[in-house]
Image: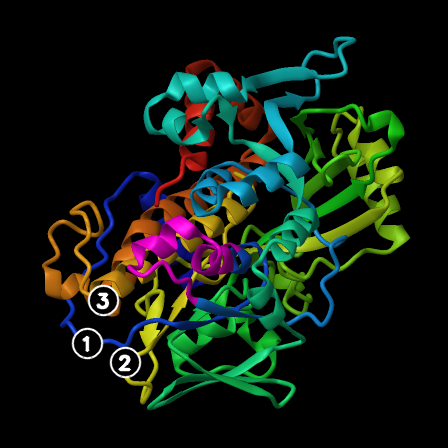
Amino acid sequence: MTMKFAVFASLFLTCLQIPSTISLSLSPKSQQPVKRVAVIGAGITGLSLAHALENSPDLAALGGNGEPIEVTLFEARSVLDYNQGSGVQINGGMSVLKRINPDLQRKVADAGLPLTKISSRTKTWFGRDNPFDTLLEMNVEECIKQVGGKAEETLIIDGEVLVYTIQRGELQKIMIENLPKEASGRLQLGKTLTGIQGNKDGITCDFADGSSFGNFDLVVGCDGVKTAVKEYIDTKKISKDPSEREGRAIYSGLRVKFAVQDGDDEFASRDRAEYRQYFGENGGYALAGEFGAGKNKPPAKGAFFIFNDKDYNGPFKKKEAKNAVKAAENADWMEGETSLREETLQQLKESSIPDLEVGPIIADSDRFFEIGIYFHNPFTLSGWSKEVPDSGGRFCVLAGDSAHAMPPFLGQGANQGMQDAYCLATKIYEYNARASGIQLADNFGDENMDEEKRSDLKFLFKEYEQKRWWTTTQITAKSIFLGYLEVGNFGAKFRDVFFFVLGKLGVARKVFIGSATPEV
């Protein structure tokens, strides 16, 4: 409990905008050119990185000779089920995807729906006949223009507002199907990482099925909350049982149930998405929205119900529940039983949530899931990268949830992972360019870092971490606070007033757009 309290105190201070203190005072060391990369995890972050390294002409040109870097993706699942997972919101991630490969970004946009409006609603306060009171409403395009500056420059390009919704599985499908033929042919399924070994020729990755692959110049962990690569960076070893790595993430004490209702012909004409958030009196809140399900396909309806785990007060387990089993983590995406639907409908009723559309979506859902919400402690002495012993100066590095798993309450998990992928790929290509003796513009890297340091991967990885750590830590802190606030842990009336006032003052707009604006 002491450790968790310290983490929450640190996250609170982060919300107060205390500046980052990551140090770059390391001794330079020569490295090998990066030609072959192992990416552990074929989720959104891993696939974004594969495209950035092997399917981005602009980034490849930065590397000097225009040649892409060879990527091998390793995925623990033996089958890629595109029906798994919920809908996601893509904003800052969409912006960097356009930089990685405009053609790929166009295909994702065509499969998704533009998100145009977000509203928060609550049970009417004074017993009026209205089904709900509206606390705030945000027109997405207007909010971006009102914030202006970098937000408008990066989220509205050539008149297109780069804020979309899409089913997670559809996004993954598009990204896999549009990999270069050679890269998709190297995709390895059913590979659970169990070991990382260095040798004079590079890095070898060992897997639970007894297979080994190598030699790689770099290993990137995009393997989610139960990340084996983070465990290696932190402890120099990898547990054979992934469940033993759960202690590396913090369980929030919040759970989410979500339902997906596939679109039909009557819904096919829907050409835009809205998010509608519903608050009740007795804990928990719900969200309903529309999500793109593929080009020329009817969009899906999604409904989420977030609530407190009865055995926890926030992240702290109740004394009377010391033997309670911890909820499954974010990435499991296991489909629930029919009884979960019935239980959730009852929870909605008990929470007094205005049930205009959430209940019907749940009742008619084609898929239904329940997961626990975890996040990583961003304050770590190990950092996001580590040199692999006896590998000739080669590294492991983290990206996405492996580096900074965060609660979903600002919709930024996938977006931040995509931004990590772009930022990391830029550093790798920058290093390769310098290794080839190519002079780069002064706007690459830390202007205070001398040329010798900027030619060393160790420094470039720390620069990547410094660039991304502060942004992701702020979003994690804000997401944690919003999660506990929205489920009513600070009181339902306080929550409602809080959202109403923040909406009137424009703070809600700034928080949403600020989190969506890419920082790469």
Question: Which residue is under mark 2?
Answer: 393
Q: Is residue 460 visible?
A: yes
Tell me: 352 left or right of 392: right
Q: Position of residue 376 (x, y in %)?
A: 46, 59
Q: Amino acid at mark 3?
A: Ser
Q: Nearer the viewer, residue 337 or 3?
A: 337
Q: Nearer the viewer, residue 208 or 382?
A: 208
Q: Residue at x 51, y 43 (%)?
A: 412
- Cα distance in 3D space between marks 1 and 3: 13 Å
Q: Residue at x 11, y 52 (%)?
A: 448
N-terminal label among 2 and 3: 2
Is residue 41 found inside the magenta-colored segment of the image?
Answer: no
Tell me: 499 left or right of 340: left
Q: Position of residue 216 (x, y in %)?
A: 42, 79
Label 3: state its secondary structure: loop
Q: Which residues are magenta?
A: 48-69
Q: Is residue 207 above or below residue 105?
A: below
Q: Amino acid at mark 2?
A: Gly
Question: Which residue is under mark 3?
Answer: 436
Q: Position of residue 410 (x, y in %)?
A: 52, 38
